[in-house]
Image: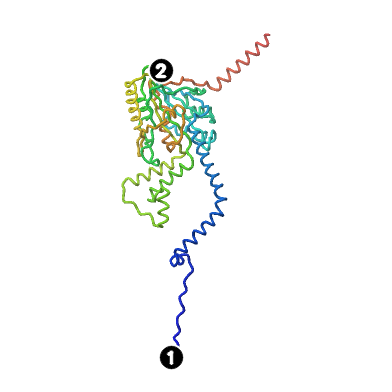
Amino acid sequence: MPPVPTAPPPSVPNSPLNRFLTHPGAWWHHLGHDAAHLARAVLPVVLPILGVLVALAVLAALVRLLARLRAPAGGQLVEVAVPAAVEAKAALGFWRNLHAVLSGTGRRLGRPGHVAFEIESAAHGLGLRFWVSSGVQVHAVARAVSSAWPGAQCQVRDAEVRRLLRPVAAVGELRLGAPPWLPLGTDHVVDPLRTVIGALGSWDGDEQGLVQVLVRPAGARSTRMLIRAARSLQTGRPMAPLPRLLAAWRNAPARPSPHDPMRSADVRHAVAKASDLPTFEVAVRFGLSSSGRGRHALRRLRARARELSAAFGVYAGRNHLVVRRQLGCRRRIERRVLGRGEVLGLSEVAALVHLPVDGQAPGLRQARAAVAPPAEVLAAIQAARGERSEDDDAAV
């Protein structure tokens, strides 16, 4: 019988997976040999570059840390006397103007300069002032105040180096209690500063109360964060980088979240805050101090601090302010260091920082009534002075 032809053996693909399955020991040996050869060729070049990059990153972090810890160089004060009539919506135009002033000048380490709005209450009365960091045009801030609130009188002077708080003090910082893309309440029937000034109240002897709101323009990264949060709430996709990478790796569509009656409201509020431009970084702090010593003085200051922090509950909306007692808060109040603040929209900042609409707070410095004469009267006065000087010259 003729021989039966045999089928050729099947061809085995020469792939890494096949070599690993057939000879795993040899595969690991070759992999280690190739890795060692690559390391000997690459490491002498990569290690110095990596060391330089790490050193530069550490140096940049140290420079930023020292810039935050040290006291701001210089700075000037704008003392404000409140006019008799204050328009409630004027603060919106003031902060639009001041955003352009702060963004254009005073940049340090990539950040613009900042201002601090301070309400100081003591036995001698109640004072309002703006502290302006060095590099920012202080007269531009004073003109912005006078333009937004006609009749307000501003006095510019250098910021003296002194302790804002006395030895016994109760301090605190107010932070957002909910995610930053949810806004504070801005639709107030009455002036919200009325509640804050009332909580500061009057002081006896050498006691002192201070509310400090530091403001600077927010960067583009903060604005993009608000936009991403609004989109995340709308689409249901995660906002954090790691969950987003896991979802992209699985290539799975975002599952619709269960029906939540508050979700649509959160989306609406987040979109409103992302559209409330320009945005700012804000830090709200307060400090109460007294020269008296002992537990009684400290207990009294802490009780007043609770009253003052509760007064900021008037700003509660979809978001609210809560007290965070942090280490070094007293030093930051005295040095007016902003650091990393909360991201707020234009309407929220205008509700926090403005001149009191009711200018009848006890001890509040009032602007003197000053009305400029008409231009015709000024021209007549100048003409009369010119004729008088000519007559004097002719008599001589």
Q: Residue furthest bottom?
A: 1
Give coordinates of residue 372: x percent, y percent.
51, 21
Give coordinates of residue 221: x percent, y percent.
47, 43
> Nearest the camera: 167 or 334?
167
Secondary structure of the residue carrying tag 2 is loop
Whichever of labels 2 and 1 marks the residue nearer the N terminus, that label is: 1
> Closer to the camera: disc 2 or disc 1?
1
Whether the residues at callouts 2 and 1 have beta carbons within 8 Å, the answer is no
Which residue lies under the disc numbered 1? 1
Label 1 packing within 10 angstroms: few (<14), some (14-19), many (20+): few
Q: Is residue 276 visible?
A: yes
Which residue lies under the disc numbered 2? 124
Q: Residue at x 49, y 58 (%)?
A: 32
Which quarter of the rendering shows the C terminus?
top right
Q: Amino acid at mark 2?
A: His
Where on the picture, by quarter, is residue 304? top left
Its colouring scheme is rainbow
Q: Residue at x 55, y 53 (%)?
A: 42
Give coordinates of residue 383: x percent, y percent.
61, 18
Q: Residue at x 38, y 37 (%)?
A: 176
Above or below residue 109? Residue 384 is above
